[in-house]
Image (tube, rainbow, N blue to C red):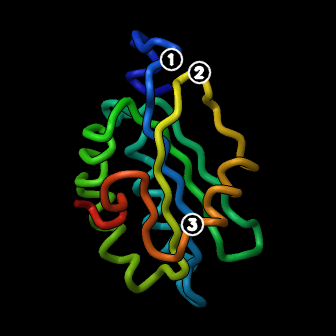
């Protein structure tokens, strides 16, 4: 459970930021890719402003998907600047390919977002970055 989930205090109609990603690891880079992913995931429960997150991996394939919900963009951007995330992004230039991102706001009460809906949104996102407002979290801007 995240600190924000423990504390509560958000109204059901409050807009929250949802960030989705789809990433494919390069052939032969599976262990490096998952090592970086595990390091980032270990930091998630303590991220200020994080409402929740979910990750999916292909069991025998080379793709992974992430979904996170944040109180606000500032919270998400602070996470993006974290040492673990920045290190994983730097290494992703060697380990990852076919990256898609999309971010958007929805009311808190619309969570949890289904993986079916998340995949639909990601499948229509262009390769590279796609956000409703600012640059993608992978850029760390």
Of the pair 23 and 39, the residue shown nearer to us: 23
**Is 56 rendered above or below residue 60?**
above
Of the pair 141 and 130, the residue shown nearer to us: 130
**Is 74 rendered above or below residue 95?**
above
Q: Quadrant of residue 130?
A: bottom left
Crowd class of label 3 (few under 14; some 14 to 19; many from 20; radius 10 Å): some
Q: Quadrant of residue 44?
A: top left
Could you say whether the residue bearing mark 1 is in a helix, strand or loop?
loop
Could you say whether the residue bearing mark 3 is in a helix, strand or loop?
loop
Q: Are marks 1 and 2 in contact (CB under 8 Å)?
A: yes
**Is 134 rendered above or below residue 4?**
below
The residue to which callout 1 is attached is 13
**Is 77 rendered above or below residue 138?**
above
Q: Are marks 1 and 3 in contact (CB under 8 Å)?
A: no
Q: Going 49% across and 79% down the picture, which residue do you hit? A: 96
Q: Alpha carbon of mark 3 to alpha carbon of mark 2: how far?
A: 24 Å
Q: Going 33% across and 58% down the picture, which residue do you hit? A: 85
Quarter of the figure with the C terminus: bottom left
Q: Alpha carbon of mark 1 to alpha carbon of mark 2: how far?
A: 6 Å
User: Would residue 101 be found to the left or right of residue 87 on screen?
Assistant: right
Q: Going 31% across and 55% down the picture, which residue do you hit? A: 134
Q: Going 27% across and 48% down the picture, which residue do you hit? A: 77
Indicate which disc, 1 or 3, sits on the residue closer to the N terminus. Answer: 1
The residue to which callout 2 is attached is 109
The residue to which callout 3 is attached is 125
Residue 76 in the image: state x and y as whole percent: 33, 43
């Amino acid at each position: 459970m995240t600190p924000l989930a423990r504390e509560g205090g958000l109204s059901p109609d409050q807009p929250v930021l949802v960030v989705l990603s789809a990433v494919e690891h390069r052939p032969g880079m599976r262990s490096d890719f998952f090592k970086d992913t595990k390091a980032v995931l270990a930091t998630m429960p303590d991220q200020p402003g994080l409402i929740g997150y979910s990750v999916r991996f292909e069991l025998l394939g080379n793709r992974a998907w992430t979904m996170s919900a944040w109180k606000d963009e500032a919270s998400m951007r602070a996470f993006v600047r974290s040492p673990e995330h920045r290190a994983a992004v730097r290494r992703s230039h060697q380990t990852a390919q076919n990256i898609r991102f999309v971010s958007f706001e929805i009311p808190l009460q619309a969570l949890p977002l289904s993986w079916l809906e998340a995949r639909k949104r990601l499948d229509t996102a262009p390769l590279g970055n796609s956000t409703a407002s600012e640059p993608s979290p992978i850029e760390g801007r």
